[in-house]
Image (cartoon, coloured by chain):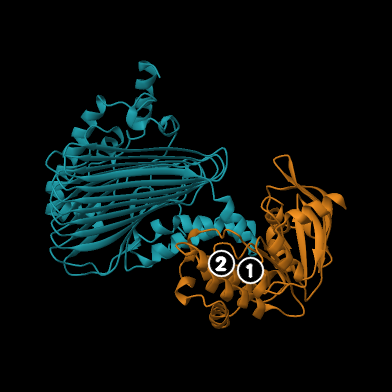
Amino acid sequence: MNETVAIKTKSYFLNHFEKLDFSHDEDFSLKKRDLAQTALKSLEFPTSKTEYWKYTRVNKIIKGDYTIAFPENEIDIDLAVPSANCIVLINGYFSEELSFFKAQEGVRFSSLSQAKKENTVLKTKFASIAKEDEIFSVINTAYHQDGAMLHVDKNVKAEAPFYIINLTDDANVMSNPRNFFFMEEGSEAQVVLKTINTKDGSSFTNMLSEIFVERNAKLEIDKVQNDGAEDYQIACEQVTQATDSVFRINTFTLGGGIVRNNLNIESHGQNTETWLNGLYPLRDKQHVDNHTFMLHREPNCESHELYKGILDDQSTGVFNGKVFVHREAQKTNAYQSNGNILLTDNATINSKPELEIYADDVKCSHGSTTGQLDDEALFYLRSRGLSRKSARAVLVNAFASDVIDQIGVEAVKEEIENYIEGLNF
Amino acid sequence: MIKIANLHASIDGNEILKGINLEVKAGEVHAIMGPNGSGKSTLASVLAGREEYEITEGKVTFMGEDLLDMEPEDRSRAGLFLAFQYPVEIPGVSNINFLKTAINEAREKKGLDPMKAKDFLKMVKEKSSLVELDGKLNNRSVNEGFSGGEKKRNEIFQMAMLEPKLSILDETDSGLDIDALRVVAEGVNKLKTKDNASIVITHYQRLLDHIIPDFVHVLSKGKIVKTGGKELALELEERGYDWVKEEAVTA
C-alpha cells in the first residue's frame, strides 16, 4: 500500500465515526477520547510489513462499509443466560432491556456509561493501561460506545458468573465495546465474555477490556467468540496483575471470518499465576490469530499457556505467544504449548512461540506440534465399530479435552463440550 | 461363517498374500502359524479392513456378505473382531466410554435402543473379571500407560464386550509372560460357544497349549502350505518351519 492510499484508507475508516455524538460522556473520558484522536493522526493501520500483524491482513476489515447504530427493530432473542448477572450490548450499545444483575454487597456490575458517572476507580484508572501506540486499541479509546464495568470490593467473592454479551443484530455493523474490570485485593470472580452475531453480512467488533487484578485477587474470563462466517473481530485484553494474584483466560473461537485476539498480560508482583488457554476449531475460510504477550517483571511467578487448534477445510490458524522475562524476574516458571490438528491439506497453521529471557534462574519452555489425526487410532476405533465420523469426533474431543478442562464456569464447559461433540467432519 | 477364496493382497506394490484359501465354520478354532514375514498379520489386517492394503484378487464372504466391500466399522458390526498385535494407545479417550459409543452405534444400526447405563456397567464388570482386568484401567485412556499384558487383556475384554461371531487374534501371545498368557487364553476359551469361531494367529505353539485349535494351517510366503490337526502345531514346535516349506516346494 503506498502512502496516499494508506491515508485514504485511514480517513475512509475514521469517517465512520464522524457523526457519533459523545457530548453526554464524562469529562475524564472525553479527555481520553481527545488524546486518542490526536494519537490516531500519527498511527497507521498495519501492513504486510508490520511484524506484529505478519500473518493477519487487516485490509478486508478496514475497507468495510459499516453502520454504527443501535438497531431500530425490536430484538427478539432468548439468550438463555445461565446466571443472575448479565450485561448485553447490542451493536456496541447497552441494552437495559436485556441486561440484569442480582445485587450483591461489594459488587458493582453495570454498563460502562453508568459507571463513568459514579465509579471513582474507573475515573482514575480508565484508559490507563490500554496501549497508546496500537491503532485498534486507540480507536477503541477514541470511539467506544459502551461496555461493561465490573468492580469487586476487597475480599468479596462474587456469587455468580458475570456474563457480558456483545450482540450484533444488524448487517455490517461496527462496534467498539469497552470493558473495565477491577478486582480489589482478595476478591474473586468469573466473567463470561461472549460475542454473538445473529445477522449475515460483514460486521466488525473491535473490543477492548482493561483488567486489573489486585493483590491476592482471582479472576477467570471465559471468552466465547461466535460471530458469523463473514464477520471480523479484534479483541484485546489488557491485564495487569499484582502480587499473589491469579488470572485465567480461556478463549474459544467458534465462529468469525477473521478473528484476532491480543492478550497483553503484565505481572507486576511476586507469586502471580497466569493461565492463558485457547481452543479454535475452524472450518471454511476462517482465519484466527491468537497473539499473547506475557510479561514477568518480578520473581517467583508462573504462567501457563495452552492453545489448541483443529483446522478443517481451508481455515488458517495463527499462534504467536511471547513470554518476556525481565532481569529481576528470577525463578519464573513459564510454559507455552500450541498443538494443532490439520484435518485437510488446505488448512494452514502458523505457530510461533517465543521466549525472551533476561533472568538467569528461570524455568521456561515452549512447544508446538502440528499433525493429522492419528490413522492408527482411527482404524483401531473403527475396528471396534465406531463410524469414521464418530471415531474422528472421539479423537478431536480427546485432543480438545485438556483445554476444556480449564473452564471453571460449568455452563460454559458444557456449551463448549457440546459444540465440539456436535462438530461435523 | 467366513470363506476366503484365492485372496491376493499387496502393499506398496509388493504382493504379500498370494492366494489364500480358508473356510471357518461356527464353533471352530483355526490356528494360523508360520515364520516371520509369511503374511500372517497381513491376513489379519486385510480381514479387519486396514486401508493400506490393496486387494488384487480373490473374494472373502463373511456371514453371507462380501467382506472386502465393507468399511472396518461395518465389519465390526457384522461380528468380526480383530485383537491387535500392537494395541494402540489413545490419550484422552476413556476405555469404556468409547466402547459404549461403539456398542450403542451398533445397536442403533440394528434398530435397538441404547444400552441402559446400569446394564452397561454390569456388563463391564462381568467381562473385565473374565480377563482379570483391573477395574481402574477402564476409566483410564485407551491403553495409555498399560503394561504389555494389560494391553492384551484389554483386547480380550473388548472382544468380550462386543460379542463377535468371528475373532481374529493376531499374535495375542507376543510379549506375554506365562501367567498373562494363561489369563488371556482362559478368557478366550470362556467366550467360546458353538455359534462363534476364532482364527488364532501365532508364531509359537505355546498359546495352542491353552487354546486348543481344531485346525492348524501353516502360512509360508503368502500361501497356506499345510493344514493339519492340533498335533501339527507340536510337530512345528519340534522341527521348525523349514520342512514344511520344503514339502510345499516338492509337492
Chain coloured orange in the rendered structure = B
Observer able to see residue B33: yes
Q: Quadrant of residue B41?
A: bottom right
Image position of A146 (left or right of B26): left
Task: Specify the farthest residue to the front.
Answer: B239
Q: In the rendered image, which residue does mark 2 sit on?
A: B152
Q: Give the secondary structure at mark 1.
A: loop
Judge by depth and name the residue closer to the eye, A268 or A301. A301
Chain coloured cyan in the rendered structure = A
Q: Amino acid at mark 2?
A: Lys
Q: How far across and how far down the image is residue A417, in percent?
A: 46, 62
Observer able to see residue A72: no
**In which chain is the residue bearing label 2?**
B
Q: In the rendered image, which residue does mark 1 sit on?
A: B206
Image position of A144 (left or right of A81): left
Q: Amino acid at mark 1?
A: Arg
Please report whichever mark, 1 or 2, sits nearer to the chain's N-terminal start. Answer: 2
Judge by depth and name the residue closer to the eye, B104 or A134. B104
